[in-house]
């Protein structure tokens, strides 16, 4: 299961950044956040710098005077470089991937990438293989004086970004929130940024976390705001300074993910197979035999699971170590469509990754802030959303309900707000 989860994360997240020398390195910033910095308005150069900045920043409560004077440069605000330039600092793409005469070469890269996916080859190993291919083509082209081979060598992608670009692979569209490293409260990037206008021009600096854990506590000192700085300053390769979230929470809209699923041919048919299943009164062989599933056949007198296009979801929450020999732990919230047959519902392509909870440590008490966007989406799905499926009927209404939570005991406590014997009351239960 962890392998499946990790593969899902690899599929949705860029996990690597590139140092000045071009060497691919695991990004400690990504390691702590578990996701790329796409859509944050920050370049990969920031991640590059965050490798050093994030060291020892776990317990940083934002008291540094340097951080209090953080600024956003104009170049950062209006950064318009391409993603490739962001990944490599400067320079342009040598290969013109739109060149039609090399379309067959693109097809070869596609086959190679499918092979990588099928055998779960790591990104680093895949890039090493492409480097080997490039060296081979260039060497043979040089020996036999074949320019076409040398041209091909130049077109072999050198990064996973280039692979995706050549293949026009769909990028993830996660929403990136800023998470407080101390209390885990979640903010949008706009909320975490303060724009200052003065005689020196327009500057941006980090906001402080305004969360109050015990708002109604009898003692005033317990009603203080968290006050942690949410963004940190990093310096890019060109000497520009940027603001970068200390923790990033990546979330993908569940309705969008469901749209991708129902649009896939055969998905709806698979979701209806459970109706033909032999059900025995005395044998609990699947979720369909349980009381919850049977109760949700109708709700408040109106049909729900008894009708097509109404889905029952299971939320899974767990933490895992993204890297070997590193104690960092990131969490993942993913949904499973229980209408699918059991042998189908946990396949990688059928899992809905909802959110990636940043590390490097698990939240101690609860994950309520991270559940906020998910609860909002589930509320919309309960009311009904119109999705374009694989039928010829156009958009149809789909509804979904969260029927159960699957996790280990610590994760279930943090998700549902149920305290363990060592727990400390933090305020209440999550309302679904
Ligand atoms: Zn906070």
Image: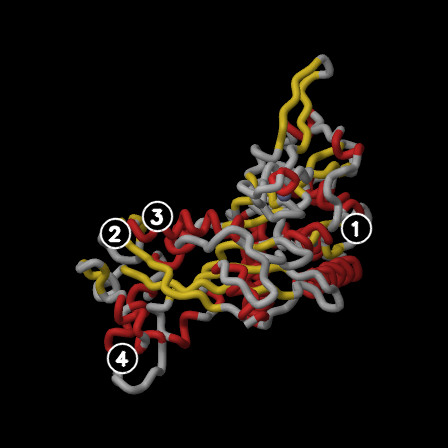
Measure how far apart labels 4 and 1 are at the Cα level.
54 Å
The quarter of the image that holds ligand 1 is: top right
Q: Circle 4 sits on which residue?
A: 277
- Give the residue displayed 28% in from the left and 60% down from the top: 310
Nearer-the-camera pick, 295 or 203: 295
Q: Are marks 4 and 3 in contact (CB under 8 Å)?
A: no
- Give the residue displayed 63% in from the left and 68% down from the top: 121
Of marks 2 and 1, the one in the foreground: 1
User: Which tag, 4 or 3, sits closer to the chain's start?
Assistant: 4
Q: Are marks 4 and 2 in contact (CB under 8 Å)?
A: no
Q: Are marks 2 and 1 in contact (CB under 8 Å)?
A: no
Q: Element under label 3?
A: helix
User: Which tag, 3 or 1, sits closer to the chain's start?
Assistant: 1
Report the side of 280 relative to 20 (left or right): left
Rendered location of residue 112, percent (x, y): 59, 65
Report the side of 358 relative to 299 (left or right): right
Rendered location of residue 67, percent (x, y): 76, 34
User: Which tag, 2 or 1, sits closer to the chain's start?
Assistant: 1
Q: Circle 3 sits on which residue?
A: 380
Q: Circle 2 sits on which residue?
A: 396
Q: Circle 1 sits on which residue?
A: 55
Of marks 2 and 3, the one in the foreground: 3
Question: Callout 1: 10 Å neighbours few (<14), some, many (20+)?
Answer: few
Of marks 4 and 1, the one in the foreground: 1
Instruction: Identify the image quadrant of residue 187.
Output: top right
Of marks 4 and 2, the one in the foreground: 4
- Give the residue displayed 26% in from the left and 82% down from the top: 279
Q: Element under label 2?
A: strand
């Amino acid at each position: 299961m962890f392998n499946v989860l990790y593969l899902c994360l690899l599929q949705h997240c860029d996990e690597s950044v590139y140092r000045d020398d071009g060497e691919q390195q695991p990004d400690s910033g990504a390691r702590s956040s578990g996701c790329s910095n796409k859509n944050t308005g920050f370049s990969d150069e920031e991640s590059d710098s965050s490798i050093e900045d994030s060291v020892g920043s776990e317990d940083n409560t934002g008291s540094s005077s340097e951080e209090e004077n953080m600024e956003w440069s104009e170049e950062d605000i209006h950064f318009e470089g391409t993603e490739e330039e962001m990944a490599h600092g400067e320079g342009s793409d040598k290969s013109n991937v739109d060149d039609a005469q090399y379309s067959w070469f693109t097809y070869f890269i596609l086959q190679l990438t499918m092979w990588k996916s099928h055998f779960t080859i790591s990104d680093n190993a895949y890039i090493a293989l492409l480097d080997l291919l490039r060296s081979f083509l260039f060497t043979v082209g040089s020996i036999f004086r074949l320019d076409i081979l040398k041209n091909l060598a130049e077109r072999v992608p050198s990064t996973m970004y280039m692979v995706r670009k050549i293949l026009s692979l769909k990028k993830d569209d996660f929403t990136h929130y800023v998470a407080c490293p101390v209390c885990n409260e979640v903010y949008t990037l706009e909320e975490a940024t303060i724009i200052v206008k003065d005689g020196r021009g327009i500057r941006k600096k980090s906001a402080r976390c305004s969360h109050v854990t015990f708002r109604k506590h009898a003692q005033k000192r317990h009603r203080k705001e968290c006050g942690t700085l949410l963004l940190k300053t990093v310096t890019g390769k060109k000497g520009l300074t940027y603001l970068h979230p200390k923790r990033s929470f990546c979330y993908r809209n569940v309705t969008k993910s469901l749209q991708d699923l129902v649009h896939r041919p055969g998905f709806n048919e698979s979701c209806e197979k459970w109706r033909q299943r032999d059900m025995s009164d005395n044998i609990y062989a699947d979720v369909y035999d349980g009381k919850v599933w049977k109760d949700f056949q109708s709700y408040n007198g109106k049909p729900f699971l008894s009708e097509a296009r109404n889905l029952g979801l299971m939320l899974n929450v767990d933490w895992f170590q993204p890297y070997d020999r590193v104690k960092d732990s990131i969490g993942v919230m993913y949904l499973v469509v229980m209408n699918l047959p059991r042998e189908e519902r946990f396949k990688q392509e059928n899992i809905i990754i909802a959110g990636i909870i940043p590390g490097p440590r698990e939240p101690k008490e609860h994950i309520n802030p991270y559940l906020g966007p998910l609860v909002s989406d589930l509320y919309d799905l309960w009311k009904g959303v119109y999705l374009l499926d694989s039928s010829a009927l156009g958009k149809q209404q789909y509804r979904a309900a969260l029927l159960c939570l699957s996790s280990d005991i610590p994760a279930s406590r943090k998700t549902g707000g149920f305290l363990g014997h060592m727990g400390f009351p933090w305020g209440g239960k999550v309302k679904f």
